Each structure stands twice: as structure tokens, then as C-alpha cells.
Amino acid sequence: MKKAGAEKKRARRSSAASRDPATDTPPRKQANKKDVFQLFAEKVRDHKDLVSRWAVLQETRVEYFRGKDFVTFLRNHPELKDILESDRHLEVEDIVNVLLSKNLLVRCDRVVKTVRPGKRKLSTWPAHLEIYPDQEFSDNDAFFAWTFVNKRPLWQTLLSLSWPVLTLAICLFPVYPHQAKLLILYSCAGVLLLILCLLLVRGLIFGASWILLGRRIWIFPNILAEEATLRELFRFWPKKDEEEKPKLTARFFFAIVAVLAILLLRHHAPDEAARARYQRRVSNIIDDVLEWDPRLALSGMMDSMQSEEVNGTETNGNFTDGERADDVNRSTDEKDHLFDDDDNDNDKDHI
């Protein structure tokens, strides 16, 4: 029995000595340790030098990039491979294939594969994607979409929390002081005027360049885009025109239409009196909004209630006076009728 116990202790010691502390970690620690490829994917996605866009994939908005842009990105930033530790010597193709196998990426293809009428080539960044059957890396017109949910930055969280406060502030606009109302009114009117002027100038530049030069020049080309980053939204100069040049007959026709439209609008423009009436009407509406005050509204309601009570009492008093007058008239009529009856009786007796 003692020999058997001693052999068991020796076996335990030998097994404990043969364990590698670097590789033999508890399962909880292994679960808590994050995958290096997950960290690499998050770092690459948050990097500003990787060009990416947003598109719709199976009714879901996803962020995607092109394969050739990913190759250029890793060539310019080789230090990001150090996140992969032992796998940092892998090629770009192998790294992307590992990301695909771990479901951190999915290869996509454009839905529209034919050139639209009036275009010279396919869109560089398609707005609608579909899953490609062969899930392997390629830099030849291949698109790759991120499948994991990216961490929200702090400013987005604060912005989402500020929306209820902004909604409450808009609802409380009628009770603001007069100076605050003026500030908000002029600020909103200025922003709206700026947007309308920008769109008008944008359309005029496009129309003039299209008619005179046969080129399509849209300044701020992404100002009306539904899906664009903040940097792309305020990009001033457009990209190179990839569409076919318009025909001379079409340009001449639209030039005549533009001249006729300008003459028609000038002929039917409102006169000075009509503009003054419209300005007076709008100013009255704005004054009603700015001068409204809850205290004045409550006092006005109290005055109206008091006036209604006074009118009611006056009508009741008038009604009682009328009844009294009717009673007096009725009594006098009855007395006169009695006197007439007495006179008739006296006449009969005299006869």
C-alpha cells in the first residue's frame, strides 16, 4: 500500500514537471483571451487609410472594401501585421482567407453586372451587393464586407443620448424667452437659406457646364447622397465624368427650354403690392409665434371666462327686467279692460 501511494505521488510530480506553463493555461483564461485575428480586423476596420463604403447586402447595410485596396493598405502599413504575433509573416491572401474562415469577412459581388445606359463602365462602388459563392481572396474586382459589429465611439453614444433632449427642447420652444426665439428663428432661417442657395448654385453650374461645355460638373457631388461619410458628404470637386458626352441637339433644345422658362417666370412674377401683402402675412404669422407667451395665454383664457360670466349675468338681468315690464303691461291692460266693462254697464243702465 505504501509503495502504491509513493508511485502515485511520483507520477503526479512528473506530470506537473512536464507541463508547459506558457501553453497549458486554464480554459477560462483561454476563453477570455481575444483572438489575434479579431483584434487585427478591428484595428484595420478603424484605420482611416483603408478606403471603404456602405452598401446593402441582403437587406442589411454593411461596410465593405475592395481587394486591391486591402493589398495596397497592408503594403503601406506593414506594422499592423505585428498584431498577428506568430502569423505576422503571412501573405495578404492568406490573412484574408483566415478572416474569411473565421467569419470576420464575407466576399461579395455586385448585383448589377451590366453597364447602365449612358455609362461607360460599371460603378466603382456599387450600392447593392450579394454573397459570392467562392469565399476566397481575389484582388480582381472583388469586394469584402465586414460581418462583425464595430464598437461605437464615444461621440456617437453621446449623440444618441442627446436626441431626446433635443426633442424636448423643440417641444418647449413656445415657452422660450423672446431673445432665444429670435436667435433660434434666425439661425434656422440662415441654415435653410444656405442650403437652398447651395442647391441653386449647384444646379446653375451643372446646367451651364452641360449646355455650354457638354460636361457634367456637380460641385459637392455627395451632398444629397443617402449613404456617405462626413468627409465624402462635404467633398467639393466631383470625380471625372465617366458618362458619354451629350449630343449637340439635346444641349441646344434644353438651352431654348431654359430661356423660355426664365422669360415665363419673369412675365408672371408678382408685383410690388402682391409681394407686400405676402410679406405682411408672413410677418404676422411669425409675430404670432414669437410674441406668444403662456402667461398671456392663461390671462387671456381667464379674461374670456370672466367676460362670458358677465355676459351671462347681463342677459339674466335683462330677462328679469323684461319679465317685470311684461307683468306691468299685463296688469295695466287688465285694469283698462275692467274700466271698459264698467262703462258699458253704466251705459246700459242709462238706456
Image: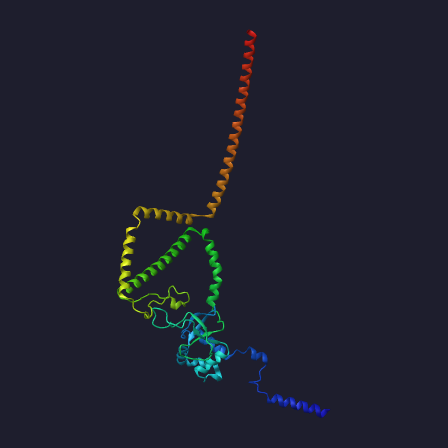
State the residue in front, 230 or 128.
Answer: 128
Is residue 92 depicted above or below 178 in this figure? Answer: below
> In the rendered picture of this protein, how many numbered marks are placed on residues?
0
At horizontal 56% and vertical 80% (from top left) the residue drawn is 30
- Across and down, in percent, residue 48 comes to 41, 73
Quarter of the image for the N terminus: give it: bottom right
Residue 161 in view (yes/no): yes
At horizontal 62% and vertical 88% (from top left) the residue drawn is 16
At horizontal 47% and vertical 48% (from top left) the residue drawn is 294
Is residue 39 depicted above or below 203 in this figure? Answer: below
- Across and down, in percent, residue 310 comes to 50, 36
Is residue 239 depicted above or below 181 in this figure? Answer: below
- Across and down, in percent, residue 151 comes to 49, 71
Residue 83 in view (yes/no): no
State the residue in front, 245 or 81.
Answer: 245
Is residue 349 depicted above or below 259 in this figure? Answer: above
* Left or right: 312 as drawn, with respect to 68: right
